[in-house]
Amino acid sequence: MVKDLRLVVTLGATLLAWSAIPSRADAHPIHSTITELVSDPARGAVRATIRVFADDLRSAVLRSAPGRALPANGPAWESAVLAYASSVFSLQDSRGRALPLRSCGVRRTADLVWLCVEAGVGRDDGPLRVRNAMLCELYEDQVNVVQGSVGGSRRSLLFVRGDGLKEMR
């Protein structure tokens, strides 16, 4: 109960702080991502849409591919973004098997990037386990929120540096 209350308070504070963020990318005072995780049992898939600040994502992708010249967009950029995302964001089925991620698009809107990844899941695989360490290698104060509709119920998870897999029921 206390843990749930702490999550709600932290999530509320994060969202409140995010709503006050100035429009300039270099001025954001908080390091955070928000991920929407949606299960589609009819298709046998789960989709994660990750909202991240463009400048933070670029810094992380360039750091993960040292010496590699990357354009600001296009197939090479999207491939590098997926490689980075796959190294810091993961899904596992209830048996602990990693679910390979595939891109379902990268879109930029002003200072934000919307990264979409999907994974195949069985119809009755049980709860998913999620890990979101995006940008934690760059920022000590990084906070990643994952909100999900999996198995008919809605849940929010909070990830900070050092967190591992968490169950999304």
Image (spheres, helix red, strand yellow):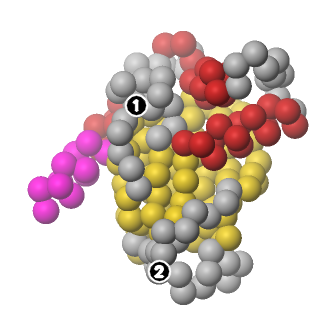
Residue at numbered disc 1: 142
> Which x, y percent locates residue 63?
63, 21
- Residue at image position (85%, 33%) is 76
In magenta, the rendered stretch is: 1-11
Residue at numbered disc 2: 126
Asked if residue 18 shows in the view, the reply is no
Magenta stretch contains residue 125: no
Q: Main secondary structure of the magenta part?
A: helix
Query: Mark 1: which secondary structure?
Result: loop
Q: Quadrant of the N terminus?
A: bottom left
Q: Image check: 86 left or right of 96?
A: right
Which residue sits furthest bottom? 124
Q: Which kind of residue does numbered mark 2 sit on?
A: Gly
- For residue 15, above or below residue 157: above
Q: Image check: 114 left or right of 35?
A: right
> Which x, y percent locates residue 114?
65, 41
